[in-house]
Image: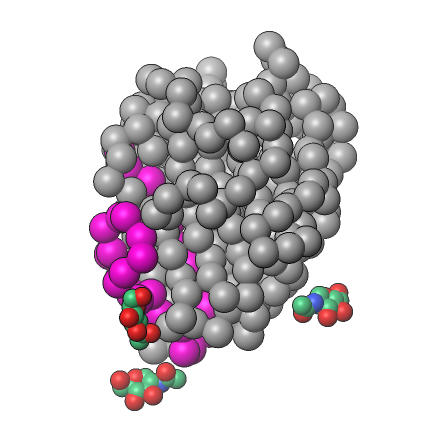
């Protein structure tokens, strides 16, 4: 996964009706990695993967600064053995409650068997503090899936967004599959090979007390107010994903770290 152009990840705090100021701008330098903890040990989601620490990731060249971009990759030259392929699992040191989060990516794993990349935010106690999957896909998926997980009592109202509603109940208590509520993008450039073909794009998550909205802007269609870091979501049109009046957002979402990882599916890579 390559984060490119400025800002790679920006977190902005709301100061007015539709006015945001930068709270954190994650830099394009090795200092980028100072903002993250590297999570090692067994993968809680049971992927076919070995998550390594920062020193190991650095020496194996899984993380670096290349071509004025932050590069975060995985082992792509060895045959994976034992518990799986080496990769990195990072979570931001800082936690956030509400805000506007902008992630600019130049590249992600292609839509190929075995890959499972994701960018998400999650609170300390799951599912009580909520989880927001901004980018996620597995195997040959060609369109991005955005998924929210919460405690009981939160659902997606099927209106106000342009995407395909997959499941509407975000509350996990009555779900055995733990699938949460999901919306798929209709855009074939939103994920994997299609995304890479156009040089990626920008994902924006706006999290307020009244709504959680996610937009995707393909490269070439990124609003000027995003590029200039004076973003105004009120000018961006209908989001791809929206959670609003059928969820008490402040009750269900708090203190999120920003995560990214490339996990691998056990059954296809072996
Ligand atoms: C679980 O589902 C049942 C039947 O739909 C409902 O009556 C109950 O309130 C739900 N429980 C929770 C905790 O959501
Ligand atoms: C769902 O959204 C529509 C359109 O905004 C609104 O009219 C309706 O009241 C909402 N439903 C619920 C249950 O909030
Ligand atoms: C976030 O966590 C801190 C403690 O780490 C707590 O004091 C604070 O109330 C939490 N914020 C929210 C919105 O729950």
Q: Residue at x 54, y 32 (%)?
A: 225
Tell me where residue 123 sits by quadrant. bottom right
Residue lying farthest to the top in this orientation: 67
Q: Position of residue 243 (x, y in %)?
A: 40, 62
Vertical placement of 191 versus 68: above or below? Answer: below
Q: Is residue 152 left or right of residue 231?
A: left
Q: Nearer the viewer, residue 206 or 192?
A: 206
Q: Quadrant of ligand 2?
A: bottom left
* Magenta residues, start to end: 141-168
Vertical placement of 258 versus 97: above or below? Answer: above
Q: Nearer the viewer, residue 146 or 174?
A: 146
Vertical placement of 88 versus 240: above or below? Answer: above
Q: Is residue 101 left or right of residue 167?
A: right
Q: Give yes or no for residue 144 being in the magenta stretch.
A: yes
Tell me where residue 174 sits by quadrant. bottom left
Q: Give yes or no for residue 115 being in the magenta stretch.
A: no
Instruction: Please name the predominant secondary structure of the magenta segment in the image.
Output: loop
State whether residue 194 appears in this view. yes
Q: Position of residue 27 (x, y in %)?
A: 70, 28
State whether residue 171 appears in this view. no
Q: Position of residue 35 (x, y in %)?
A: 73, 38
């Amino acid at each position: 996964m390559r984060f490119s152009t400025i800002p790679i990840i920006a977190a902005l705090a709301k100061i007015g009706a539709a006015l945001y100021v930068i709270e954190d701008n994650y830099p394009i330098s090795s200092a980028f990695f100072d903002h993250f903890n590297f999570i090692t040990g067994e993968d809680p989601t049971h992927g076919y993967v070995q998550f390594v620490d920062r020193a190991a990731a650095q020496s194996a060249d899984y993380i670096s600064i290349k071509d004025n971009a932050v590069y975060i990759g995985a082992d792509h030259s060895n045959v994976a053995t034992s518990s799986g392929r080496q990769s990195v699992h990072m979570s931001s040191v800082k936690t956030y409650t509400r805000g506007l989060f902008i992630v600019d990516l130049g590249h992600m794993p292609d839509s190929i068997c075995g890959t499972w990349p994701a960018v998400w935010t999650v609170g300390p106690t799951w599912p009580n503090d909520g989880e927001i999957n901004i980018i996620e896909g597995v195997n040959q998926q060609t369109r991005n899936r955005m998924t929210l997980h919460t405690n009981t009592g939160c659902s997606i109202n099927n209106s106000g967004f342009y995407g395909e509603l997959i499941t509407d109940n975000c509350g996990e208590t009555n779900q055995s599959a733990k699938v949460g509520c999901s919306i798929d993008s209709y855009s074939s450039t939103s994920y994997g090979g299609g995304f890479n073909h156009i040089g990626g794009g920008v994902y924006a998550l706006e999290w307020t007390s009244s709504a959680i909205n996610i937009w995707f802007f393909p490269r070439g269609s990124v609003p000027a107010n995003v590029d200039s870091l004076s973003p105004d979501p009120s000018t961006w049109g209908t989001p791809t994903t929206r959670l609003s009046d059928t969820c008490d957002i402040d009750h269900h979402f708090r203190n999120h770290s920003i995560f990214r990882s490339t996990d691998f599916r056990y059954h296809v890579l072996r």
